[in-house]
Image (spheres, rainbow, N blue to C red):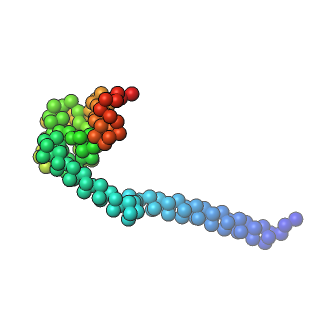
Amino acid sequence: MISRPTWLVLLAVAGTAYLAGHLQARFVIHAAAQESDGPSLPSDEALKKIVAANDALKIAAEGLRQDQRYAAVTKAVNPYAILTGGLNALEDLESGRGVDPYTFASLYAGDASDEIKGFLATDEEGRLTYKNKVIRMYSVSRLKKAELMRQLVLGETKKDQKQE
């Protein structure tokens, strides 16, 4: 039979082990949560390439704007509009038939240009509106046409090939 002092020592050791394990688990969870707070930036090399790509997109946007094939309603350059050979997001917004995915996301994220900011509101269902019309994304058929145009612009498909 185990004596009373031995039981107390065993109980103290077990309690200490339990407490140490519990605190360590809590510390690991807390440390992991702290690491995930805020965005993690890409490597320096990747950042340089992203900045270069953005600079190239700005130059392409200016070329499309001169050809009257680019009109954005966001502060940032619209890569979707550029890679599809140009879009007029203002005209799309005015028509009420939908906007491209980048414009849609950017407007919801709060990146509207000063030109349209005063015409934006939120309806009772939390949807973003422009001049009291709900802002929608392009229809599937319009997205497919834009994707085909992107492929043509980037030389991924030939004009005479049919989209499957």
Left or right placement of residue 29 versus residue 38 in this view: right
At a point 32% along the width and 57% down the height, the residue shown is 50
At a point 29% along the width and 58% down the height, the residue shown is 52
Which quadrant of the view contains residue 163? Answer: top left
Report the front residue among 42 and 27. 42
Q: Position of residue 160 (x, y in %)?
A: 31, 29
Left or right placement of residue 125 versus residue 93 in this view: right
At a point 38% along the width and 60% down the height, the residue shown is 46
Report the front residue among 60 and 15. 60
Report the front residue among 29 and 107. 107
Q: How many marks?
A: 0
Q: Which of the image's four quarters has the C terminus?
A: top left
In the image, farthest residue toward the right: 1
Q: Position of residue 158 (x, y in %)?
A: 32, 34
Left or right placement of residue 94 versus residue 98 in this view: left
Q: Is residue 130 above or below residue 42?
A: above
At a point 28% along the width and 40% down the height, the residue shown is 153
